[in-house]
Amino acid sequence: MADRRPNDRLARLIEEAGFSNKSFASAVRRTAGEAGTPIGCDHTSVSRWLSGYKPRADAAELIVATLSRALGRAVTLADAGLAASQKVPVDLGLTCPESADESVETISRLWQADLNEASTLVKAQAQPSAWKDASLTWLLSPSTAAAGRSCGPRVGQSDIARFRATVDLFTQMDNRFGGGHARHALIQYLAGDGARLLTGQFTDATGRVLFSAVSEATLLAAWMSYDSGLHSLAQRYFVQALALARFGDDRLLSASILDAMSHQATFLGRFRDAANLARAARQGAQGVATPTLTSHFLTMEARALARLGDARGCDLALAEAVREFERRNPDDDPEWIRYFDDAEMAAELGHCFRDLGRAVNATEYAAQCVGTIDGGTYLRSDFFATMVLADAHLAAGEAEQACHVALHALRLGDQLRSARCVSYLREFTVRLAPASGSRSLRDFHEQAREFSLWQQVQ
């Protein structure tokens, strides 16, 4: 469970309404009596709520009803720091909210439910219908910028810059150590500062920048959850990141989020869904996407088609991706896609050719990018590329060389906490099984057992 922290939001609202602990308890009892749902609470109960104790769902609703009446405006559970008291519906976060206020409420509840390790989210499976609904909603609904807010602490560009800089640190940790390293800390930060900024006072222009920034941060939460094997949570964060980007009037970021959904769908074996998501990203950003972005959308489509065994479709998508990539000018790209360089493109080609069974091509492109990706910054990407090279050697009948390369990947990934990395290793062991009687394979297993990622494969 999350560490209990004082509920500063509730404290501010009670103070704003002019209540003492005793008078607030009395007001809550009065609200409950009028609603026909008597509740037993006193000043001690209020003290416990302020200390971070989460009241029952019915009590939380009475608290915000009391505050709404006293302040003359609607106060949500998120406003009062009580989102975690709500029962977590099974569909929380799986649909795109229709308004900016609803979007803020939904993502706040999702962050809190995540921190409380709600089993509804942790144990659930990803729902393919959620990807379809989200992409259709985005394609049919134009971007709608969120209006400014006139209450709460004032939020300015410096606050957003500070927020972005902090999220950038989490991005660096994710790339270097895997999603499992700092995912929980990121969610704690978003549930605190992210929610505070979204419920603050800002102009229309600042609101657009803010929603876009929080969308990027929520997209990172999705990637880190995906990398940690928490696929239902990841999917919900992807959907809510898409909604936030829409209210930030950020079409390119929205398309990139669909592109990320495609990546997850391919990983989960939903290849047709993955191809359609990548196509939706390209269609929705047509006319505004940079060549780099368009190229990436096409590589995601190609990855899905390769897994389907559609060689012709994959080849067509890759050829177009390469043409777009050759037209790119990184200076025109959003900051968040500038990592997609020659080495990353070679890695995507290597993945596709591996999955199509073209061992020679896969070896050529995987070898191009191994060691050329900035291992200090993108350690996980270097691990993936190295494992693709190991798979390619194995497919070419070079089991000994494949084991040598896989050991190099294990050394690279020894600091990584990533369920995706473990998945790459599991696939490698399946492909390696036919050569199980060789001396080189026995030596490989003996050395591999020393590494933490390999221990998770067993």
Image (tube, rainbow, N blue to C red):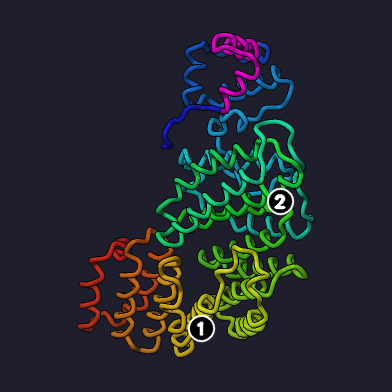
Residue 217 x %, y %: 57, 51
Residue at 47% x, 85% y: name it.
Answer: 362
Q: Which of the 4 image quarters holds residue 398? A: bottom left
Q: How many marks?
A: 2
Q: Magenta span covers which residues?
A: 9-33
| Residue 313 in sight | no
**Kind of residue indicated by mark 2:** Gly
Percent x, y of residue 261: 59, 61
State the mark number for residue 353: 1
For the N terminus, the quadrant is: top left
Q: Three-letter amino acid code at disc 1?
A: Phe
Mark linked to residue 248: 2
Residue at 33%, 79% (x, y): give it: 405
Provide the secondary structure element on which disc 2 rests.
loop
- Vertical placement of 183 versus 273: above or below? above
State whether residue 286 is above or below residue 389. above
Question: Whole-Å distance between the Cαs marked 1 and 2?
Answer: 38 Å
